[in-house]
Amino acid sequence: MTIETISRARRSLLFVPGLRPDMFLKALTQPADIICIDLEDAVALPRKDESRDLTMDLFSKSYETQSEKMVRINPITTRHGLSDLDALFDLECPPDALMLPKIKSANEIRILDELLSTENTRHLSFCVIIETNSALEQAIEIARSCSRVTSLILGGVDMSADLRCKRDWQSMLYTRSRLVHAAASAGIDLLDVPYLDLKDNEGLERETAASSDLGFTGRAAVHPKHLSTINQIFTPSQDEINRARRVCAAFEESDTGLVVVDDELIELPVVRSMYRVLSIAKMIEAL
């Protein structure tokens, strides 16, 4: 019987602009599980080539960090997106992952998977931005499209425009719920869109807690000041870890697949979630 585990913690993702390599180096000292250099939204069209050159130069050497290093490329249906991909093949120390914008179908992911099958890029994992109505419709297929897809992230601005709805949490509840379904179906992580009001920490905490309760596993940020709140909310509490240990121990001692812990009947779906809690706790402890 297979129990879901995770390979790394993905509670928080910090975006840094591709035109600021100095910010990337500073970001590596921050408590973000993922550092993502943004070549797309953070860079104006006339400076795309400059941003690519600056970013790719960063990967001429390796870095001693536990953070997952990611690059958000331009859409693969554009000239700049294709140039971003082409630049990856010659890197001495490629990033760990790519963030893929404007994806509309699972077939696009499969094509990229095959294209990046060279020795220098076959290790790259994918974080897919779900920000179009077409992607939302195919969210489960995209999440399951290939083994490289390790996370989805909500692209709230473009998605709300595509759906003709407001961008607030409640108006996007259907979208979030559908993405929770897709990510859980594939056993991958799901990150929420950054909270853009840097002065409203109460709002950040309230909205991030709601996302966690719904089934998200992490959240992106555009400023390091949000990382501690995000990490705290997506880190299992000691009580949650202790309960997970009791549930998993009871399950391992049982030969029926059904156990009772704290006067509650526990079945396999709950056991899977408890093993995930322990896996997350173990990864965070190693950071």
Image (cartoon, rainbow, N blue to C red):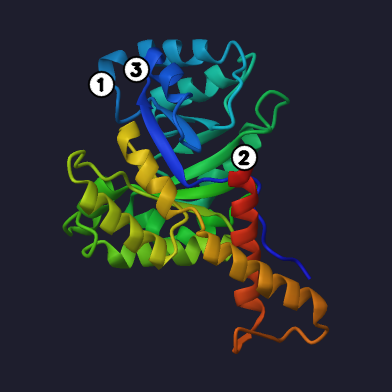
Residue type (three-letter) at the residue carrying disc 3: Lys
Q: Are marks 2 and 3 in contact (CB under 8 Å)?
A: no
Judged from the image, the secondary structure of the residue bearing numbered disc 3 is helix
Q: Are marks 3 and 1 in contact (CB under 8 Å)?
A: yes
Which residue corresponds to mark 2?
113
Q: Quadrant of the N terminus?
A: bottom right
Residue sitting at x 65%, y 38% = 114
Residue type (three-letter) at the residue carrying disc 2: Asp
Q: Crowdedness of circle 3 by 10 Å Cα count: few (<14), some, many (20+)?
A: many
Q: Quadrant of residue 254?
A: bottom right
Q: In front: mark 2 or mark 1?
A: 1
The reply to whether residue 273 is visible in this rendering is no
Q: CA distance from mark 2 to mark 1?
A: 28 Å
Q: Quadrant of the C terminus?
A: top right
Judged from the image, the secondary structure of the residue bearing numbered disc 2 is helix
The reply to whether residue 50 is visible in this rendering is yes
**At which x and y percent is residue 71?**
47, 28
In-image side of 254 versus 153 (left or right): right
Residue sitting at x 36%, y 10% = 50
Say which of 45 and 243 sits in front.
243
Which residue corresponds to mark 1?
44
- Of pointers 2 and 3, the one earlier in the residue sequence: 3
